[in-house]
Amino acid sequence: MPVINSLKHGEEADDDSVEGSHMLTANNFDSYSHEYPILVVNFYAPWCYWCKRLKPSWEKAAKTMRERYDPEMDGRILLAKVDCTEEVELCRRHHIQAYPSIRIFRKGSDVRDDHGHHDHESYYGDRDTDGLVKAMEELVAPIPLEESHKLALDGKHKTTAENVKRPAPKAGGCRIEGYVRVKKVPGNLIISARSGAHSFDTSEMNMSHVISHLSFGRKLSPKVMSDVQRLIPYLGGSHDRLNGRSFINHREVGANVTIEHYLQIVKTEVITRRYSREHSLLEEYEYTAHSSLVQSIYIPAAKFHFELSPMQVVITEDPKSFSHFITNVCAIIGGVFTVAGILDAILHNTMRLMKKVEIGKNF
């Protein structure tokens, strides 16, 4: 979701007499989405502060658009609303987790192939009456009046089987990637929903996630890692311990579930010596991880608690001198001669003993 810096909100008084938008339910939502080239829906909850603030502007904007683009005569656009406290399954099907959520449903040119329904778009613009009307005008502008009649006519003549809506994806989500600079002190990385213009339904939020890659320090190239592992085979097995792991909340434990990861990090450094100089071949941070599910009264989140150990593992390459090599060779040669002498003495004494025994038998 884009970061909302500042939105314009209407200052109109909440006048219940102004009702310009259509109320949609699970029974009529599909028929309306297939009938109009553009259907703009406000998914709201009556208890939400931001929904109450949006309501007068939304209804006035819907009334203005109905007067300019009559649904019966023009039929290019329709503004509607869904009460998510009444239509729980419908809102869940569209993955509504924050209120208000304004979605734009377009009926494309591929009506017959894809049932006239495209993936929705989200509206993040201003919420005052003028801003809403201007945004709706921009949506209608590219659609000729004749085309809207053709699309509407096609939609009305479709059979019931053809009008079956494509199933919504089973799960919504987003992809997060990047890096964060942190100090070498204990800290937390928290991924959570936050907005200055929405109210969240925490019971519908699921923080299940798959970790493709998580590591600390500079990313190691495969060549460097393979070179190090030739020297130290056990190294590098824990610098990306969470890679490829899935943490899925199947809702057996209920709603408002936060997934927490506790990471204990240890720095490992490999130092080599070349030409009497020390050279750092590798600096990596290996970690252990423990994960758990926690129920909370707050907005669900994915939390990573990390703590850098005061201990550090330093692996130093200590090359041997040539004289040490010669000494080892001489020791090996001397050992071979010593063992050969012992074997020769045993064999010689055994032969002498056997001869004495044979001489004794003859006499």
Image (cartoon, rainbow, N blue to C red):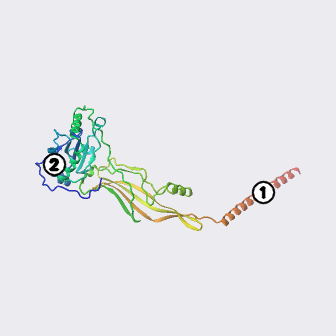
Residue 84 in view = no
Q: Pointer 2: residues within 10 angstroms few (<14), some, or many (20+)?
A: many
- For the question of whether residue 56 can be seen, the reply is yes
Residue lying at the far left in this picture: please name it: 17
Location of residue 158 with respect to 269 vertically, above or below: above
The numbered mark at residue 344 is: 1
Work out how far the residue at label 1 is from the one at label 2, CA to CA, in angstroms.
Answer: 110 Å
Please report contact status of discs 1 and 2: CB closer than 8 Å, yes or no. no
Please tell me which residue is depicted at 63% across the width and 65% down the height of the picture: 320
Q: Depth-wise, is mark 1 or mark 2 nearer the camera? A: 2
Q: Depth check: 265 or 174 in front?
A: 174
Answer with the quarter of the image where residue 325 lies: bottom right
Residue 262 horizontal side relative to residue 280, left or right:
left
Coordinates of residue 112 in the picture (x, y in percent): 29, 34
Disc number placed over residue 189 in the picture, else none: none
Indicate the amino acid at tag 2.
Glu
Residue 207: image location, x then y, percent? 33, 51
| Residue 351 image point, x, y percent | 81, 54
Looking at this view, is 24 or 250 the one in front?
24
Dot 2 falls on a residue whose secondary structure is helix
Q: Secondary structure at mark 1?
A: helix
